[in-house]
Amino acid sequence: MQNQKRVVIDSISPQINDGEFFIKRVVNQIVTVNSHVLTDGHDIIAASVLYKHENDKKWREARMQHVNNDEWIASFVVEKQGFYAYKVQGWVDYALNWQHGITRKIEDNQYVTSELLEGIEYIKEIAKKSSEDEKKYLKQLEVLFSNEEKYSEAIIEAQSEKLHAIFSKYPKKHLANTSKIFQVYVDRLKAQFSTWYEFFPRSSSEVEGVHGTFKDCEKLLPRVSEMGFDTLYFPPVHPIGEVNRKGKNNTTEAFEGDVGSTWGIGSKDGGHKDIHSQLGSINDFKSLIVQAKNLGIEIAMDYALQAAPDHPWVKEHPSWFKWRPDGTVQYAENPPKKYQDILPIYWESKDYKALWDECLDTLFYWIDCGVNVFRVDNPHTKPYYFWNWIINEVKKKHPDVLFLAEAFTRPKVMQQLAKQGYTQSYTYFTWRNNKHELIEYMTELTQTEQREYMRPNFWPNTPDINPFHLQGANESKYIQRYVLAATLSSSIGIYGPVFEQMISDGLPGKEEYLNSEKFQLCNYNWTKENKLTTLITKLNKIRHQNEALQQTNNIKFCTIENENLIAFYKWNDDKTNELLIVISLDDNNEQQGTVQLPLSDLGISNGHQLEVCDLITGSCYNWNTEWNYIELHPSLPFHIFKLKK
């Protein structure tokens, strides 16, 4: 194919799968675009990033700067929610090329009267676009460049920064080459920064053995708010199947009074658009959403696409399930776990369009009730392209809606779900415990392509996962795990009050809770306070006060001479908020070490006095050397230092 263009545009980043998927940002974040831009020969070239919001008619332009080795860079700010498009454009800039060439000749003491006359042609073209003051200046140059008697003055102006700035401001993009278009999706801030608390509504009653209600949940909202959580996530609140209902501790036989698993959705009382009758009415649920919002809390709902054997879908839409020759449906399995009380949906059903529409309509139903956050159960067991479709359909009408993917599975599966549109993702943090694996995992999340599309949400525990390192753990270990989550990731969550009350008994040999709340009512002292609840409250407040903790990607690990101590530097984009965090990974013994400050990142030299203030204790210190002594005890195994230069 013939092409007269001379500028080559290559290796554009960020972009995912050559533009198949969009990168992600939140409102007012920066998108920094890098590209290789080059041409044949020695001509001067220029490049820009062109960008616009999906509702804008005109492209805006950010001029790229040459870094080195044909690498160019520019940034733009995404100011509102929705899709932005961006592309790179490059061209040979003949005006700048002229100025560069005449400068070289003047430096070589060549006589350039002919070149000055050539420059007049570029000036005339620029003058058509320029302001009145610029026009006046350019007109003077036309006269000057054509007057040999003022040659000395002319060659000074020909090389001037003022002329260079005007040429750069009004480029003639002759034979410009433009890349393909890439996209960035912009969410509200909560997509990047959120603090989740999970509890079972049915265990909210103050009276032991009595099923909790939404009215009981309303009484707990002030506690959740006071602890600094902005998202309250409920496991499914729908009717629970009676056929094959699970008993306590996941036994296959349920006795009278056993409440079953909330994820066994559907019964004679309704399905995914219905509320469990013992929790209250739909109006009670809407009231809870409003009361939570008044306290700065959003209710996150569980979206679990599966059905109990007696779910209305089974009779009304039998083709949505795969039937065996004996007339039964194979129950759900995730080896070694078995879910006899759940039927998986048959996603290859010939009636898949109606199935997809019903799944979408279910989301719209709850969005209309006031829900804008969904935690999606086992998304990796449903088709990826289904998620791409349904998330896009929701976002078209409701851009505030966020989706958290609950998929503790293979890395590339989790990454694919994020690429297909999930707002946030559960992660392997739950199992990352020592210094090496924590640094390795954070480096993967923040220094590879994943930083552009996968927003991690760090959970120390969940109703499904009671990790071995928390079983029988002491208070220091719980503090350590929460502070790691709260400072490494901008989105975090805990399953409570199990976590903060350090209820940790596990099934022998399994990472599961003994007497799991998934299968029974539990009764808690919701007024109980301890050191852990105090520190969680303080940490959540610190997170809301410091922008450096409201993003995940700006992190640099610091050298510290002790494998039981981990240290890292975090900052906001304009570096007006800078923190140094040091955490002990030893929950039993005192640890000491010497931490190396990242002087170049801080923009200071060795000997510069740096004030470091611990945001937990309020103690402040003056450091003036690159290496500084740290001592941490199990009773308070961390420092969060705010840095003041």
Image: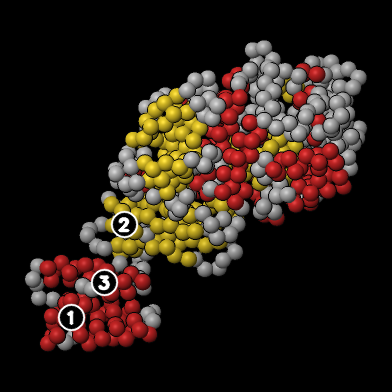
What secondary structure is marked by label 3? helix
Q: Is residue 31 left or right of residue 80?
A: left
Q: From the viewer's side, name the closer residue of 410 and 591.
A: 591
Query: What residue do we see at 75% from left, 43% from top?
Result: 222
Q: Kindly identify the amino acid type of the residue bearing the numbered disc 2.
A: His
Compared across the picture, whether 323 is left or right of 142 comes to right
Kindly state the secondary structure of the residue where label 2 is placed.
strand
Q: In the rendering, at what x and y percent does residue 532 appear?
A: 63, 31
- In the depicted structure, whether residue 172 falls above or below residue 459: below
The location of residue 545, given as percent across then percent down, is 56, 49
User: Which is more N-terminal, label 1 or label 2?
Assistant: 2
Q: Is residue 361 above or below residue 306?
A: below
Give the residue type that dot 3 points to.
Answer: Glu
Kindly report the distance in space between the C-alpha atoms of the residues bearing marks 3 and 1. Answer: 14 Å
Q: Quadrant of residue 112?
A: bottom left
Residue linked to disc 2? 66
View extreme (left): residue: 109
User: Relative to the observer, which residue lies in front, 61 or 590?
Assistant: 590
Task: Find the residue positioned furthest to the top.
Answer: 508
Q: Which mark is residue 154?
A: 1
